[in-house]
Image (cartoon, rainbow, N blue to C red):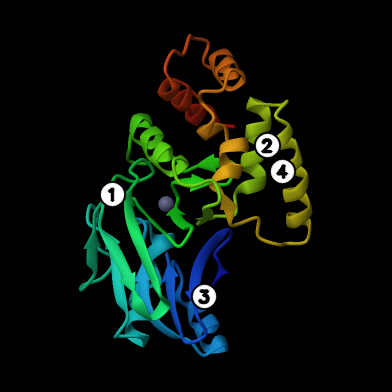
Amino acid sequence: MNVISLRAFNDNYIWLIGNGRQAAVIDPGDAAPVSAALAERNLELVAILITHHHQDHTGGVRELLAAWPEASLYAPAGERLPAPGATALADGDSVALPGLALELQVLSVPGHTLGHIAYYGNGMLFCGDTLFSGGCGRLFEGTPEQMHHSLGRLAALPDDTRVYCAHEYTQANLAFCHAVEPDNPALLNYMKEVAKLRQQDVPTLPSSIGREKAVNVFLRTAEPAVRATAQLQAMEELNEDCQVFAALRRWKDHF
Ligand SMILES: [Zn+2]
């Protein structure tokens, strides 16, 4: 089984899980790159998995289902379903894809949207717009408390979990992390690595939970250096990790 990135729009990634015969895709905002990849590799589409309702994650669903009527569609129970016949998923559910020898657990991770879910299994995390490398999703619908809790759930997964985010935002996110925590050696090393990859137009993803815990300030709200910078920026004392998170998220919105 392998996972490949398909580019869509400016900076989206649609992730395709394939085993040489069958394939599943996560968040196909556009059908065209998926159809091309399936044809090129002679794969049968068996499942479409959606993390949240935004158009750049769901826009290709109906066209793909028209071409692959047997494919199963999975989407969050808490949001408008992207097409009729979808299986609505809530926290604790799992998705079995026997043809791909894969079982994915569903984690409820509200914040970016209220019904946002992530899929976790086989050492892989597909987290949509919740966790990015070096960043996290904007709070379009949820509260800072919800997002902080959701990120905490993801950070509790094993360090070697591969993190498949839905956007190539890494380089800009790391510039923000650097403004918050300029002396973090792990961050400085990762910035160099990412600069090289982007120069060669290579995806910086997947990341890993261990790496994100080392560099991503939104997962580092308990670090004294992160808290100190957040307090300076917010011009108030921040006693709880969640307050540090909220201050960082507000700052990042206009960084
Ligand atoms: Zn989104």
The answer to whether the residue bearing label 2 lies less than 8 angstroms from the nearest atom of ligand 1 is no
> Is residue 163 among the parts visible in the rendering?
yes
Tell whether label 2 touches label 1 (CB within 8 Å).
no
Residue named by callout 1: 115
The first of marks 2 and 4 along the sequence is 2
Q: Which of these two is toward me, 111 or 156? A: 156
Q: Which mark identifies residue 190?
A: 4
Residue named by callout 2: 175
Q: Which mark identifies residue 1?
A: 3
Q: Which of pointers 2 and 4 indicates the residue nearer the eye? A: 4
The first of marks 3 and 1 along the sequence is 3
x, y (%) of residue 252? 54, 32
The first of marks 4 and 3 along the sequence is 3
The first of marks 1 and 4 along the sequence is 1
**As drawn, 100 above or below 234:** below
Tell whether label 2 touches label 3 (CB within 8 Å).
no
The amino acid at mark 2 is Ala
Q: Which of pointers 3 and 2 indicates the residue nearer the eye? A: 3
Q: Which of pointers 4 and 3 indicates the residue nearer the eye? A: 3
Q: Secondary structure at mark 2?
A: helix
184 on left or right of 36 = right
Marks 1/2: CA distance?
29 Å
145 on left or right of 131 = left
The first of marks 3 and 2 along the sequence is 3
Q: Residue at x 74, y 56 (%)?
A: 197
Q: Which of pointers 3 and 1 indicates the residue nearer the eye? A: 3
